């Protein structure tokens, strides 16, 4: 049974400051991922998904390798092998779903479906992480989700196969985030490297079946997706090491604001009134939690 409390038992000013740092790092990750996702949308349309993921993972692994030595990885993974394997498998699955959906849907649509993850994460955190979810966090999470629905109204695309794939990916992503919180004592280099290595091997296996040789400029862009993705994943892992999953969940909705910004910058898409109203609700929900955490920190 979930105990509903405005202030988690045993919370201190130090805990609150840690949560604020986690929120700041998570907000940084949403900006990094927005740029990465825009490039991923292009790569998913221009190249086979396996090839796009191969470039992404190869660069990410090369960058993270110096911070994740094999002996350290083996020691960390052996501490809780089942949960690590679950996290790695679901991480690979959600990335595959994301790219698959991107190949058929607009970036803003895929982002919308993936924003089901925060509400799922709050529920998972309550059921499996024994986090005490106060009314403020529940209301902020639900308000943010309502803002998403207002800003990006469900259309006939909601029943399409790519949309269902995106929703499956969103569910997997929420499980990955919850597992990351449970494994918060594991070095972040190990957590990030393990998921990229497995996905690198899986994507490499698809190369014999589909390959388009990229130009040098295209190869650079494909690799940039990996660099940004690695940085974004490191930031997410660090955020969930610092703060409870339920405290971070409402701030996942900020990604929709970045999607709107990139849509305007890249495609001259001007948000309509509903989008602006939804964005205002999303920002309000996040600020409500942020101010609450600052008050606890003081």
Image (cartoon, helix red, strand yellow):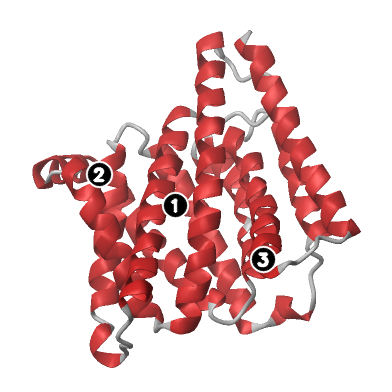
> Residue beneath label 1, please?
176
Indicate the position of residue 265 as horizontal and vertical percent values: 66, 61
Give above or below for 246 relative to 219: above
Viewer-closest of 220 and 206 = 220
Residue furthest left as drawn:
71
Mark 2, other Cα within 10 Å: few <14 / some 14–19 / many ≥20? many
**Mark 1 vs 3, N-terminal side:** 3
Residue drawn at x 48%, y 53% is 175
Image x and y of residue 6, in percent:
71, 21
Up/down of 270 relative to 190, above or below: below
> Spatial distance from mark 2 to mark 1, Cα to Cα?
15 Å
Residue at numbered disc 2:
190
- Residue 108 numbered tag: 3
Q: Is residue 85 visible?
A: no
From the viewer's side, name the closer residue of 233 and 198. 233
Quarter occupied by the N terminus: top right
Which residue is farthest right?
273
């Amino acid at each position: 049974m979930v105990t509903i409390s405005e202030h988690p038992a045993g919370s201190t000013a130090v805990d609150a400051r840690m949560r604020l740092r986690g929120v700041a790092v998570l907000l940084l990750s949403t900006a990094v991922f927005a740029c990465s996702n825009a490039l991923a949308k292009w790569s998913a349309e221009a190249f086979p998904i396996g090839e796009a993921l191969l470039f992404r993972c190869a660069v990410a692994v090369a960058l993270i390798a110096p911070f994740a030595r094999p002996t350290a990885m083996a020691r960390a993974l052996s501490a809780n092998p089942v949960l690590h394997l679950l996290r790695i498998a679901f991480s690979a699955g959600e990335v595959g779903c994301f790219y698959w959906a991107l190949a058929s849907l607009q970036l803003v649509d895929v982002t919308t479906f993936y924003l089901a993850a925060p509400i799922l994460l709050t529920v998972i955190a309550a059921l499996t992480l024994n986090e005490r979810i106060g009314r403020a966090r529940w209301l902020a999470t639900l308000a943010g989700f309502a803002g998403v629905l207002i800003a990006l109204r469900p259309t006939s695309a909601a029943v399409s196969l790519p949309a269902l794939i995106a929703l499956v990916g969103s569910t997997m992503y929420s499980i990955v985030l919850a597992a990351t919180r449970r494994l918060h004592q594991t070095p972040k280099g190990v957590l990030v490297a393990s998921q990229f290595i497995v996905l690198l091997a899986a994507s490499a296996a698809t190369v014999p079946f589909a390959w388009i040789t990229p130009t040098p400029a295209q190869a650079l862009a494909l690799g940039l997706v990996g660099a940004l993705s690695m940085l974004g994943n490191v930031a997410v892992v660090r955020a969930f090491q610092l703060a409870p999953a339920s405290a971070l969940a409402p701030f996942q909705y900020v990604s929709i604001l970045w999607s709107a910004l990139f849509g305007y910058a890249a495609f001259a898409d001007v948000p309509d009134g509903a989008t602006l109203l939804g964005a205002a609700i999303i920002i309000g929900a996040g600020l409500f939690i942020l101010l609450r955490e600052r008050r606890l920190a003081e």
